[in-house]
Amino acid sequence: YEGLAGGQSLDIDTIKKKLNYKLIDKIHDLKTARLFEFCVAAPFIISNKTKEEIKISRNYGKIIGKVFQIIDDIHDYENKSNEFINILNIITKDEALKRCHDYELEAETLREKIIPNNAKYFLCTVESMPIDKHLDFVGVDEIQMCADHERGHIFTDRLLNLRGNKLTMLM
């Protein structure tokens, strides 16, 4: 099993097999992590960045993909939409969220290596907004997400605490 198709095939083949963390992690790695890896690395490849920058971007994408898939598994499990191939069949929700936290710490280290110090702007989700930087402009789209029970606390935090030096736009 290799690549996205291999991950999907493994996912389908696993429905009737006994699950373990190593197998679930491999499915996450081959499917979602590989997809995110490509999406993050493609701009670095196209713009002829160094091999090291491309390597860092690929690793960053993989980590973000794994976090996404774990969170997606949690949502699926809680909504009873896909209980078969799910990380929560192997570990507890708290353990899964701890893994996400650990991945996010690793991602932060990589992000610091690929974001230039003199960046003029950032386009990112509210979860990955650089809250330690002083920016002339801060724009938050979908601010109504403050009411969302899953992600609302992050939007609310940005609404209350993050301001541009010259302009803040909440859309």
Image (spheres, helix red, strand yellow):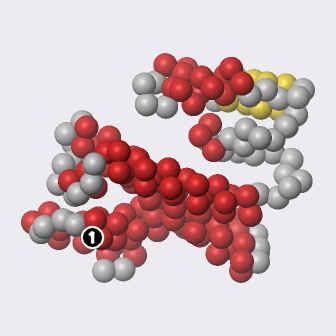
44 up-or-down from 94: above or below:
below
Q: How many marks?
A: 1
Q: Position of residue 83 (x, y in %)?
A: 18, 49
Q: Quadrant of residue 94?
A: top left
| Pointer 1 residue | 23
Q: Quadrant of residue 110?
A: bottom right
Q: Is residue 119 left or right of residue 88?
A: right
122 up-or-down from 159: above or below:
below
> At x 46% / y 68%, what residue is drawn?
34
Mark yes or no: residue 27 visible: no
Tell me the quarter of the image containing the C terminus.
top right
* Element type where label 1 sits in the image: helix
Mark yes or no: residue 78 visible: yes
> At x 19% / y 39%, what residue is drawn?
80
17 up-or-down from 161: above or below:
below
Tell me the quarter of the image containing the N terminus.
bottom left
> At x 40% / y 68%, what residue is drawn?
29
124 up-or-down from 164: above or below:
below
Hey, which residue is sitting farthest left in the picture? Answer: 16
Q: Position of residue 146 (x, y in %)?
A: 54, 21
Q: Quadrant of residue 56?
A: bottom right
Q: Position of residue 14 (x, y in %)?
A: 17, 68
- Mark 1 belongs to which amino acid? Leu
Q: Position of residue 162 (x, y in %)?
A: 74, 28
Q: Residues within 10 Å of mark 1 (few under 14, many from 20)?
A: some
Q: Is residue 23 left or right of residue 70?
A: left
The foreground one among 107 and 84 is: 107
